[in-house]
Image (spheres, rainbow, N blue to C red):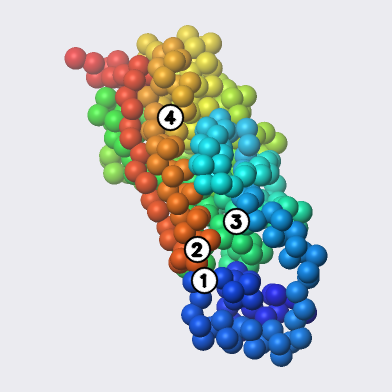
């Protein structure tokens, strides 16, 4: 008899059953009684070996990093480690390639290290309730927003307002006179923030009265890591060769934006007649030539909110979703389009 069977019989989540059986706070007394009675009825016997392992690792927090080559995630990871250690816990990092399943990786971490809680850094936003049922410890999705098709009470998230951020970028370029604006996105199979930012880009163009052009929205194949510099260079180089009329590029990440600048420079374009913008605000963008115009994600705020939320869940509080605004940092990589210059 498994803990999942008790959850199904009681009509509650696996996490709720686990907390009830371990006498943790945050569960109504009547619910706790019902779960314990069902456990006795079903003759549930806890795995003492697993319980001992969990107890020995009660100070471990797992960080599941989806897309570990993303430079932005490296900055987030360092801040998470600092915050977790300051609270007396240790961080165990699980690196998950972009094309792999982060929930499967989380299940593996639960079986091996038995962490007290988990943070998912990146990941698909189209998960199902069944996916979250496999995560039996308190967890927070960091940088992945609340999905509209899911019950928000089943999980927690902390993320940037991608829609507003992309709109700010497009509005900035529109004000500079740009009308032929391209977008560098994730691979064709992406179901994460790359897809959300692409949708936001199309919506922002419409708000500015710019007709959509599918040939200016570029996505790569699934054979390459979509957060890598090589991927961004390849995507941008092909775009600029095929569409030399483009006057501005909106990249879904800073890594792609910096790669696009390199590709454009190789073609003799930046910064004279092509503007390029990024999204993230990674540290290196303040030191490149030209300095990158980008939508800055407040990493300190994101990490602090994530860890505060995670530890509140560990104390039995309810799931919540936090959306944080970004800030457009205008720098040297965006300028007024030539034909509109005064």
Q: Could you tell me which secondary element the residue under label 3 belongs to?
A: strand
Q: Residue 281 carries which label?
A: 4
Name the quadrant containing residue 133: bottom right
Comparing marks 3 and 1, which lies closer to the viewer? 1
Q: Mark 3 points at which residue?
A: 117
Question: Percent position (x, y) of residue 304?
Answer: 44, 44
Alpha-carbon span between mark 4 and mark 2: 33 Å
Alpha-carbon span between mark 3 and mark 1: 15 Å
Task: Out of 299 and 237, give the one closest to the viewer.
Answer: 299
Q: Mark 2 points at which residue?
A: 315
Alpha-carbon span between mark 1 and mark 4: 39 Å
Residue located farthest toward the left when viewing the structure as drawn: 342
Question: Who comes first in sequence, dot 2 or dot 1?
Answer: 1
Alpha-carbon span between mark 3 and mark 2: 11 Å
* Crowd tier of the residue under label 1, counting other residues whose Cα lies within 10 Å: few below 14, some 14–19, many 20 or above: some
Q: Which residue is at 35% across, 16% downward? A: 332
Residues at badges 2 and 1 in contact (C-beta under 8 Å)? yes
Question: Who comes first in sequence, dot 4 or dot 2?
Answer: 4
Q: Name the residue under label 1.
A: 25
């Amino acid at each position: 008899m498994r803990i999942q069977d008790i959850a199904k019989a009681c009509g509650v989540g696996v996490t709720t059953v686990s907390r009830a059986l371990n006498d943790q706070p945050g569960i109504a007394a009547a619910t706790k009684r019902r779960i314990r009675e069902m456990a006795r009825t079903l003759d549930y016997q806890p795995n003492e070996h697993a319980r001992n392992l969990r107890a020995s690792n009660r100070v471990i927090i797992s960080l599941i990093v989806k897309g570990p080559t993303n430079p932005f995630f490296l900055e987030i990871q360092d801040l998470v480690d600092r915050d977790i250690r300051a609270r007396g816990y240790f961080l165990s990092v699980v690196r998950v390639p972009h094309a792999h399943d982060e929930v499967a990786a989380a299940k593996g971490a639960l079986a091996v290290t038995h962490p007290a809680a988990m943070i998912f850094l990146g990941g698909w936003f189209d998960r199902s309730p069944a996916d979250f049922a496999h995560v039996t410890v308190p967890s927070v999705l960091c940088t992945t927003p609340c999905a509209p098709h899911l019950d928000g009470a089943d999980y927690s998230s902390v993320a940037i307002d991608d829609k507003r951020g992309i709109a700010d970028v497009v509005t900035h370029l529109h004000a500079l006179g740009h009308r032929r604006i391209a977008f560098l996105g994730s691979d064709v199979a992406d179901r994460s923030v790359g897809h959300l930012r692409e949708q936001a880009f199309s919506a922002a163009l419409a708000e500015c009265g710019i007709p959509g052009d599918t040939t200016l929205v570029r996505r790569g194949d699934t054979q390459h890591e979509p957060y890598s510099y090589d991927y961004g260079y390849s995507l941008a180089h092909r775009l600029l060769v095929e569409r030399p009329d483009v006057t501005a590029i909106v990249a879904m990440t800073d890594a792609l934006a910096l790669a696009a600048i390199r590709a454009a420079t190789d073609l003799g374009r930046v910064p004279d007649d092509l503007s390029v913008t990024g999204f993230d605000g990674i540290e290196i963008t303040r030191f490149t030539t030209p300095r990158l115009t980008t939508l800055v994600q407040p990493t300190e705020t994101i990490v602090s909110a994530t860890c505060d939320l995670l530890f509140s869940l560990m104390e039995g509080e309810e799931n919540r979703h936090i959306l944080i605004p970004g800030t457009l940092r205008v720098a040297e990589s965006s300028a007024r389009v030539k034909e509109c210059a005064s």
